[in-house]
Every structure is written in C-alpha cells, then in structure tokens.
Image: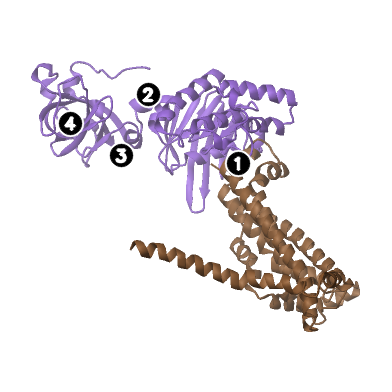
Chain colours: A purple, B brown
Amino acid sequence: MYVELRNINKHFAGFQASKNVSFGIAQGILAALLGPSGSGKTTILRMIAGLETPDSGNIFIDHVRVNDLDPSKRGIGFVFQNYALFRYMTVFENIAFGLEIKKEKKSGIRERVMELLALIGMEDLEKRYPAQLSGGQKQRVAFARALAPNPRLLLLDEPFAAIDAKVRRELRCWLRDMIARLGITSIFVTHDQDEALEVAGEIILTNHGQVEQSGKPLQLYKSPKTSFVARFIGESVIVDDYGLLKGFSPAANAGQGHSASGAIRPEFIRIFTDKGSLRHENGTEDAVVESLAFRGSFIEAGLRLKNMLLTAHHSFEDAPIAVGDQVKVLIYRLYSFSGNQVKLVTNQYVMEHGNGYDYVI
Amino acid sequence: MRKERSVIPLILILASAAFIFLMLALPLLLILVESFRAGLDFFAAAISDPYALKALQLTGIATVSSVGLNTLFGLAAAWAITRFSFPGKGLLTTFIDIPFAVSPVIAGLIFILTFGRISWLHPFLSAYDLKVVFAVPGIIIATVFVTFPFVAREIIPVLEARGTEEEQAASLMGAGFLTIFRRITFPHIKWALLYGVILCTARAMGEFGAVSVVSGRLRGKTNTLPLYIENLYDEHQFTAAFAVSSILVAAAIIILIARNIVEYTAKKDEDTNVR
C-alpha cells in the first residue's frame, strides 16, 4: 500500500478523535474519507499531512514511516477546506509560492506555473487576486497551488463544501478526471456520500473515530459490513420488525430475542399501479401512498405499510399515483441487522426466480 | 410619525456639532489665536527658545523609542496570543489592557517605586551608574507603559479574523517563520499596525501624567513638551505656553490626517483583498 495507517490513536482534550484507525491506499487511487461530521475524518487527513500528531500508531507513505518527518518534507499537497489562498498574492504568485520556497529557478517557476494554469484552464487570470475569483476558480487555483511542487500525495479537506450545488457536480467530475490524468495518489475528506460514491475509487467510511468499512464504492453500497454503513450509505429507512413483511422471516437472520430490525433502501421497493405488471404476486403487500415528493428524475413516495413508513422511488414512466392511493408493493430485499452485523436478505418469493443484485461496475 | 423622524436626526446632528465646537474646535482655535497674540516674532522666539527645543527633542526621543518598542512588543504579543495556546494566555491578554485602566500618575509612581531610591533595585542601578528615575530612560519607560496597548490591541482582532490557514498552507510548503511573516501575515496586518503606530504616536507625544512623576521636570534636561508647557503656564507666560502648545496641536492635526489616509486606504485594500 502506498499510504498506510496502522493503529492510529488520537485524543483531543477529553475526546478520542481516532480509535485504532488502520487502512491502506494503493498508489494512484483517489480515496474518500467519508463520515458524518465529528467522525474524525479531517483529523485523519491532518495527521497524514503532519498538521496533527497521532498519540500512537504509525503512518507510512511509500513504505517509509513519516511520523517524525516535518510536514513540509512529506511530499504532500494540501487543499484546505476554504482553500486558504494567499489573499495578498495574485493567482500566479499563489501557485509559484511553493516553488519559490524550494528556491527553484525563476524561468522554471514561470514555466511550471503556466503549465498548471493551462491545466486548470485559467491562463488569462494569472494577475487576479483570490477575492476576484469565483468559488470554483478558487478551488482550481488551490488545486494547482498544491500540485505545483510535484507532491507524491494530494490531500483535500472537504474540497467541494464551499461551492454551490450546480458547480459542485461539474467540479467533482473535473477533479476526478484531472487526478486520473495525473495519476497522483489522492485522499479527500467529505461528509457527502453522493460525492464519495461518484468520485472516489476507494472509500474509507469513518464513524466515532473508527473506520467502519473501507472498499470500493459499490462494495460499500452493496455489502455494508456494519449496521452503521447500511444506515449511512444510501437513503435507507430503518424498520423495527421486518418479520411482518411477506417473504422475510426473522429466523433467516438467526438473531435471538430482539425484534428483527433492518434497513430498506428506496430502490429495493417497487410500486405496482396495475395488476397486469404485477410480479412475484405472492410476495406483494398492500400499501397506502402517504406522501409524494418531486425529486427531479423520479418521484419519492412515502408508503404506509403495516404501521411502517417506507420510502420508494416511482418512475414518471409508470402510471401516476396520488396521495391516498391503495397500491401493491414488492420489497425485493433488505438489510437485516443483528447487533452490528448486517446481512442482505432477499424476499423468498423473489429468490425462487434467482437473485438479481449482482452488478459489477 | 413622519415629522418626528425628521426632527430627531436634526436634534442629534445639532447637539453633536455644538458639542464638538464647544469642547474641541473652539479651544483649539483659541490656542492658535492666543499663541499669535503677541505677534509672529514673539511666537518664533517662544518656540525657538533653547528650553522649548530641548523639550521638543525629548518628546521626539520618548515618542520614537516608545513607538518602536511597542511595535515590537505588540507584534510579539499579538502573534503569541492569536497563534499559540499556552497557560496564562487570558492573563496576558488582560495585562495588555492595564495601562488603559490605571491612571498615568499611578504608572509614574510605580516606576519611582521600582527604580527610585527606595527600590531594592537601587543599589544595583547606582553601582552601574544607571539613572532611570528623573532621567531620560524613566521618561521612555513611563511613555512605553502608558502606550503599550495600542499596537497589540489593533493587531489582535485582525490576526484573529484572518485565521491561520494561509500560514499553515505556507508552512506545509516549507516556508520558514520569517518568510511566512513577511509574505503572508504582514500584508494582512500592515494597516492595523500602522493605525496602532499612529495612535501610539499621538498618545506618546501628549503623555503628561506618568512622565510628570518620573521626570523630575528638570528644565532643559528632563522636560518634555507637555511638561514644559505647564511650566510656562505656571510662570504666567500664557502666550508662550500657547505658542508651544501650537506645536503639539500641529502634530496632532498631522496625525489625524495620516490616520484618515490610513483608514481610507485600509478600507479600500480590504474591499479588494478580503472576500
């Protein structure tokens, strides 16, 4: 592994920001440190950069322990959450700063800065000051500034947090492509699962200072290892007793005593509006449409089913539904929890026709 | 309702204008009028009197050295307070304000106690023939004391507001302390620093109370301009007192103009460089 953390612990006055954190990232990968706020993801990033010191544990970059290495000697490019551009320097001076510190030749600096300005598509803005740039432009300058001294590892702290939604989507694709093109190993921190799922090649999901699960985005999405992951990733609805649902028996979970709780994702539910299209009829349930919300490319429906309130997605191509309608729904599968363990359980009636949840992307 | 709204601003404006005229403009005007009462020749003689020149020189020395020392101290204290956490930080922040709270006369007495005959430092000082009290060093120390909050107080809020991220970014790239200060921090605080220096200068030039206690008021030796003016006044040389006062008034006006220029430029600078 190119970047490796082993058993990292870190305390701040009275609270543990990192508990036995271990993970590795291969060279050239864009990895996301994902987690709710306060989960310790930024602390991990700052420890890799050397802005914080772990209480115990080891950090390796390219197989060399860097714990005692000065931050500036770790070969890291860091993009701060609010970019931390030097406000009294022009775009050019900002990008050139790291090279000047390294005492590189003036002509070499000019060449490298122009190359980076071309890369971020801002050749004509070299004389602007940060205050004269838009959020997206600032972000790109921060990216170029971090890359200027040719770091071996790029760290980005919530790189898209300060940008408005529309530009954010564009910019994250841009960043992903740019990093792929340069092949630089990168780690970014985010609390936005969409961002991590879309951009990252590898996700490290943290909660309460611990790594809950790490792996490829689809892997986390499809096979959450802990109930936290199942709850956090996707827009799951938690049900207290899925044994009440047709086709699911709590025995399959082998959990004793407690009620069989689980998580159901919207895409696990299909709403049937007419009898003709009904599938796996024995497994379907009656539900009442309680709410409808327009979500752009689909409609989000709140369904009342045996005292459970579930969320499902409904396509515009299907027959329209209205609040108060009686509909047939089929729950294809759900995540069943036992303790912190998670198991994907498929509806027995669906199973008879094979399991359809085996995409590989 | 409408009428009330137009009357209230008028009353407030008139009240402020009348207050400023009576309390500030009129007295200053009278100083100028009084100082030229006995004619231009007398005015020139009064301000070129050797004692007056000596007092002007001493005020200059005290002002320059206290501004210099307080700039260094203010920068160091502001940096320490905003960039590091250390035990006693709150105490240090409070201590900086003490000169604002303590009467200058008491400040003067403190230095008489510390460096005068009754001090336990006195044997040491006299052994090396160091004269502090009733000498120039005492005047400088007293002036430093009464003016030391100005620079630090101006810089601290700016350093706090601008945050440490730019410095962190520079340090991550391997920039040393001096480079970071010169290229990152200083541009942020330069106007606040200059503003603090101007306020500090104004206060140092006019300082009377503390200096009056420590100087011993030896004419031609330890008399600063404000002390000299009071001497003249005590001797009923009113016109000469006013003439010498006009030097301080002129300096104050220059400082005021400088302050306005700095304020205006800083505002413009902030508009272009801070978000």
* B258 relative to A156 in the view: left or right: right
Tag 2, which secondary structure? Answer: helix
Specify whether disc 4 shares its chain with disc 1.
Answer: no
Please provide percent x and percent y for residue A154: 56, 29
Q: Position of residue A139 (x, y in %)?
A: 52, 31
Q: Quadrant of residue B241?
A: bottom right
Which quadrant holds residue B102? bottom right
Which amino acid, mark 2?
Answer: Leu
| Kind of element beneath mark 3 | loop
Q: How much space separates mark 3 and mark 1, taking CA atoms?
A: 45 Å
Query: Subunit of mark 2?
Result: A
Disc 2 marks which residue? A218
Quadrant that contains the N terminus of chain B: bottom left
Residue of label 4: A249
Task: Name above or below for residue B21 compared with residue A178.
Answer: below
- Which residue bears the numbered disc 1? B166
Q: Nearer the viewer, residue A217 or B59?
A: B59
Q: Given this view, does label 2 or label 3 mark the residue nearer the observer?
A: 2
Callout 4: few (<14), some (14-19), or many (20+) C-alpha neighbours within 10 Å? Answer: some
- Closer to the N terminus: mark 4 or mark 2? 2
Q: Identify the disc placed on residue A113.
A: none
- Any part of residue B241 in sight: yes
Residue in the foreground of this view, choosing between B82 and B68: B68
Q: Earlier in the sequence, mark 4 or mark 3?
A: 4
